[in-house]
Image (cartoon, rainbow, N blue to C red):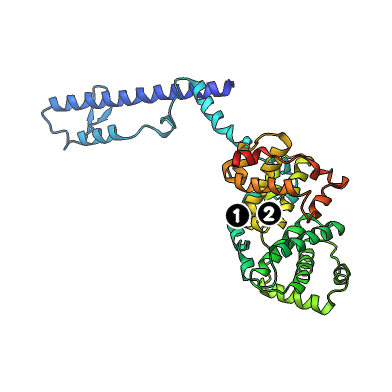
Amino acid sequence: MPRNFKDAVQNRRVLSVINQNLLQDKQRFAAQVISKQQSCTQEPKKSSSPVSNSNGSENTVITEDELKSLAAQPAPMSLEQSGPIYSDPYQMEEVEMEDISEVPILDIDSCDVNNPLAAVEYIKDLHSYYRRVESISRVSPDYMAQQFDINEKMRAILIEWLIEVHDKFDLVQETLFLTINLIDRFLAKQTVVRKKLQLVGMVALLLACKYEEVSVPVVGDFILLSDNAYSRKEVLEMERLMLNTLQFNMSVPTAYVFIRRFLKAAEADKKLELLAFFLIELSLMEYEMLKFPPSMQAAAAVYTAQCTVNGFKQWNRKCEWHSTYSEDQLLECSSMMVRLHQKTATTKLKGVHRKYCSSKYAYTAQCEPAHFLLEDHA
């Protein structure tokens, strides 16, 4: 134990003893004077004039009220006890260390304190804000029912094509997630004929590039990708319609901001990170996954990736704390991701599978799915 801590405890004990002695002396002094005054024939309450003693000095007679007031006065502040005195100084040290030990377990930002781009001072407020507004940026999981000329399969084909275009242009990951968000929010408010669906996807990607990218592809690049199916005028008209329909609201929390945070909490390596993004991109194509909020999809992708890599269930306290989702809450979403992983090699839409079967993505799609999660969920 540190010497300073022992000295502090010893000093507190000495001050406590001095305080008790002062109070006892003050009470004895008051009792003695009151006893002497009661034996005198004069009324002590009316006498306040000085009296000479045998040495010629003057003593002031103290009244009973003044004595009671004196006894009621508190001890000097410097002598009061500031807190409980532990009989065992080791007990105090144990309590303090127990309280402090909880903080480092949950802290995942200490390594980025000197990185201004990490915004450590604001990261907790940012994610608190993301959680509050993510419901606003979501769409109804059955919005496709209001569309008369397109369906869920057409949406999946469009997203598969956009994933390939996104990879070909080597765009940042944020752009892909924002593109899908813009498409769903637009289709939830605007009916579209099937021949204009690819135009909607192109314009959503163009807007996301303008919002996220440093170097933005020009309109002519997108027209070439569509094999000149649309004119420049049609692209600009759809861009204006989409922005007005969405009321220029481009700042929405997608699954990307959450999965980055949860991967950090999981202390993920490159293999785990690639597998989590593989699963979340498979989920982007699946219309049924819209019933889960972006934060839950992100947490389920990280959880499923951990289970896939390790071969057993893994969702520690730190991951649960930062995601706010327990393992039981993630099982339904996670089991759907495992099913998507199982059929990705045999389905007709193999865009994501081809992407993650390349050396660029470390052949991530070839790993064995976590079948045991389906057995436990069933």
Residue located 14% across and 27% down the image: 38
Q: Is residue 343 left or right of residue 129?
A: right
Q: Nearer the viewer, mark 2 or mark 1?
A: 2
* Mark 2, secondary structure of its residue: helix
Residue located 55% across and 24% down the image: 5
Residue located 43% across and 28% down the image: 84
Residue 186 x/y as whole percent: 68, 69
Q: Which mark is residue 314?
A: none
The residue that mark 1 highlights is 131
The residue under label 2 is which amino acid type?
Ala
In the image, residue 161 sits, relative to residue 111, either above or below, namely below
* Residue 109 shows in this picture: no
Q: How many numbered marks have been drawn onto this rendered protein structure? A: 2
Q: In this view, does 134 lie to the left or right of 362?
A: left
Question: Which of the 4 quarters of the picture holds residue 140?
Answer: bottom right
Residue 302 x/y as whole percent: 69, 44
Q: Nearer the viewer, residue 160 or 110?
A: 160
Residue 338 x/y as whole percent: 69, 45
Disc 2 from disc 1: Cα separation: 11 Å
Local crowd at mark 2 within 10 Å, few (<14), some, or many (≥20)? Answer: many
Placement of the C terminus among the 4 image quadrants: top right
Q: Which of 148 and 116 is in front in this view?
A: 148
The residue that mark 2 highlights is 255
In the image, residue 13 sits, relative to residue 133, either above or below, namely above
Q: Which of 201 and 212 is in front in this view?
A: 201
